[in-house]
Amino acid sequence: MPQAWDARQGTGRGPGGGSRAPPPPYSEHAPGALFKAAQSQPPAVPPPPPLHPLIHCAQLPPPAGTPAPARSGEPGRGAAGRGWTGTLNTNPHTSRGLQVSPAEGLGQNSQRSRATRDHEGWKMVAGELATLTPCFVSLSFWLSPQSPSLSTCEMLSLDPLHPQWDCPLGSKDLDREVGPWGGGSGVPPTDCFPGSWHQDVGLDCKGSPEGAEARAWTVYYYSLLQSCLQQAGLPETQDRSHLPRTGCPGAEVTLCLLGSPSTFLSVLLEGGVQSPGNMLLCLSPAWLTKVAAPGQPGEAALLVSKAVSFHPGGLTFLDDFVPPRRATYFLAGLGLGPGHGREAAELARNLTCPTGASAELARLLEDRLLMRRLLSQQGGVAVPATLAFTYKPPGLLRGGDASPGLRLVELSGKEGQETLVKEEVEAFLHSEALGDALQVAVKLSGWRWQGRQVLHLHPRAERDTVVDTVLMLLEKLEEEESVLVEAMCPSAQLPFPGESHLCQPGAGAWWFCAGLRPLHLPPGGPSPSPELAVRICTVVCRTQGDRPLLSKVVCGVGRGDRPLRHQNSLPSTLEVALAQLGLGEPAQVAVVRQRVKAAAEAALAAVLALEAGLSAEQRGGRRAHTDFLGVDFALTVVGRELTPVALELNGGLCLEACGALEGLWAAPRLGPAVEEAAAAPLVETMLRRSARCLMEGKQLLVVGAGGVSKKFVWEAARDYGLKLHLVESDPNHFASQLVQTFIHFDVTEHHRDEENARLLAELVRARGLKLDGCFSYWDDCLVLTALLCQELGLPCSSPAAMRLAKQKSRTQLHLLRRHGPPWPAPSIHAVACCPLESEADVERAVHQVPLPGVMKLEFGAGAVGVRLVEDAPQCHEHFSRISRDLQGEADHPGIGLGWGNAMLLMEFVEGTEHDVDLVVFGGRLLAAFVSDNGPTRLPGFTETAACMPTGLAPEQEAQMVQAAFRCCLGCGLLDGVFNVELKLTGAGPRLIEINPRMGGFYLRDWILELYGVDLLLAAAMVACGLRPALPAHPRAHGYLVGVMCLVSQHLQALSSTASRETLQALHDQGLLRLNLLEEALVPGEYEEPYCSVACAGPSPAEARLRLLGLCQGLGIDGPNYPVAHFLSHFK
């Protein structure tokens, strides 16, 4: 019967309780980790205590060409070669030296003489190793009569001094104990972190005393945090708990993490950048309290009384909160091992705030059999060939279609299964699904065995041994647990650089693994070096719309004959790792990266699809969802192609590995990493879910419903849980049936806005509406909304600022007078203009404003009535036409004619046109999104094409953002979401106009798609007086390039090849993005775009080519509407 090796005691425990020699070392799914050492006799002297640094030596097979050693029962063969095992104590405080035990069949005299000869050499080797770090060092060596001196030292592995504590909660790589987790008992080690920091810090939480064991863990995690910060070159945590922080519970973002600082350090630091002071690390469950949530039976709010808060620059503070902060997002390290795993699981269950993990979901992710079946069936991800014997499997594993390479055998009982097991194992070992695998692993699978399952490696040819191991492990099974027999994925063996094919080993041939070291050398050569193996670790995050996004790939490279685990290999980038394997061609590396990306994202997509079918109870709460996933891959060859094979799912270990790689760039002399942090998408998801949490159930009054282009408002409000009340002039508006309260009120008479605001305030009070905020996204209603907010005492920019921004000439003339300080002043962005209310004004204006110029409506929208004028006659002509055709709201509803039809003449400036959408709160810029516009159709300036994100150089983009922000501040717009139109000239940005509401047309949809930021939700949060929960520096995930369709140019296409139904179908298939802007195909002289059609791509050029092809096929492109010309800016 296989014995269990206890690495901490240095002995194996047999059935009789006696000390036995260790069995073959076993590795967790390391690609190519096919190492299996021969079992040795017990050492003559017992090993020292477990905390002492030791060197353990185990017998290995000889190098190629060396005669085999004597076998047990064949003493006559002992002269052919000698195998040695021994223990060398490198602790300078002990007196033991080298203790060597012979291979089977060798005599004691021979052993001792040989040991004496090599004693000094071993002491030298051990001394060199001991200078590195206190550790357990395993040396496997072979002594040959042809080489009386010490031969090449192979199979070196460095295992941390405290293997029981060196892994975070929920670690999967602790293959050192037999038996399931026994719970979270035990205390952590003390004095195990090098460094110096203050120990007299206030870790006690008032009102929540801790026991001795819990206190020890709190101190341990605090020391671990300081050690991590120190190694990253960041300052020590400052203790300011004696001065409690005060805040606004329930009105601020609070991202709370409970778990190992080393696991979550990358998340914590990124959170400190994206949401300063709102990313909190709790080092003890005692710092958190669950309180019943009123009106939400069975759910509880999570309050934070104490935490370490994170800020930009890696600054951290130990804070107390009075009153406690209310968590808007909770993520905990879950596990059954030492620490706070059990308490964290209970804290995460049935919370009112979003949670990124739960014990219930962790149980599913930890079920290796379930996940492999899920990834194989639903995600199309390659997994190791696996034979599973499962005892009373869970419902999710019962039935269903067969998975490639995955065989599930349901057992009715654990006894009397010998025949069945033998038949299934024999069929599995001979199946083609195992491919080139030379060994199989046998292990237990299930929640109880998380991180502590024993891995038994056996040659594929040893059927009986595999059967015996399976039968032995079957005795340990409980319901819903399994015994797995799985193929050990062989490592990818790449040809030497320059070879165009996979070489095959043969007599006298040089066989290169990864193009680095020969595996078979000519006779008489040095001992061979083992092949290299790579383990690929990925972090993939759930983003807007439940879409998976790969955020980071980290690799570990090591010897293929040793356990290649997360915490015993240095992290490296995929490019560096593949270069170690001889694959350095950028195109080939890109192919591998794309395959890894596709597999990792497919894995998370499969998990999210599984979760979507679970009840709230099965997930551990209504708001429990998996927000990120770690996926480990082996890189192997399948069908002569490098293929990533998913080994297991985990979160903490992969996240920690990514953080370790990013930590390489922590030192200032090395500079910052250019890549986005692995945790950036996860923190963005935390903030997005926090915003939803804060806004759910908020009561908002919307003034003006808008047209068909604003249908998304009502859909989004339902999704966010907003309670909307609507004020609208049209009693039959479709939105009247989609809101909590509908107030029919004529909002078009803008000369009565002050009076109307008072009347509306009275109506609101009379209906008993308890509003949290009031806002509008409709141009005509912006000033009225500001006046109404003033009457109701609700947050909003001032009515004066809204009036100033609403009237275009007043905006420019006001900013022209703002010369600073500070500088640059808004005046440098303003453009000369003159208001026009009569023909006399026109005559005066042509002498004040340089021509050519632009004439437009003072309060207009959608470029209706805008025209390029080159001389005085054209100015008079256009003024007369507009005065005649567009006199009031009835002539063209929705473009601002309720304010009148006054016009202005402004200077025409050459340059590229851009939109800048801003989120401003309390006069501070929180976010900015810049898009590029294609050349407009002159002389009417109708928008033709757009691209997002901008293609401007970073400096020019920053100039555009600052110009837009300065102009808004110059007009007094301190709170809200604003759209600013500018032109970039040779002398810098110049203002076209400010729209004091979120951008129209496609802009909200595009920003949500690319950045995951919803301007509508941000505007609603500002209206409620809440700081929008936005990432500090959102990054776009791809590009969008689109064109406008006009009824005057595309009536035939829009009625046939590019009909609304056709475009919608293409949108639903993901081939294009459709934004419908008008309901009917009605041509007219003063028209607005009918719709926007866009295509996505990883680059502007690719998105542009896709769009051009679609437009040509749909009939949108034509001689009178040259799409290629309109897209020429976006090459």
Image: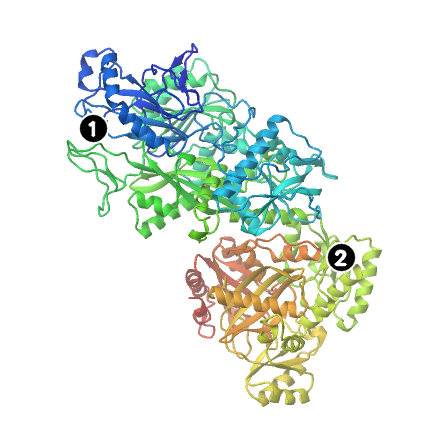
Marks 2 and 1 sit apart, C-alpha to C-alpha, by 86 Å
Type of amino acid under label 2: Phe
> Which residue is the site of mark 1?
64
Between marks 2 and 1 in the image, the one whose residue lies nearer the viewer: 1
On residue 742, the disc is: 2
Q: Quadrant of the C terminus?
A: bottom left
- Earlier along the polypeptide chain: callout 2 or callout 1? 1
Q: Is residue 485 above or below residue 1121?
A: above
Numbered-mark total? 2
Task: Where is residue 514? Give x, y as percent.
Answer: 28, 41
Q: Secondary structure at mark 1?
A: loop
Q: Is residue 179 above or below residue 744?
A: above
User: Image point 36% across, 48% down: which residue?
Assistant: 575
> Image check: 801 left or right of 223?
right
Give amino acid for label 1: Ala
Residue 1054 picture location, percent across and down:
52, 66
Relative image position of residue 175 (x, y in whole percent): 43, 26
Residue nearest the observer in this picture, 809 or 45: 45
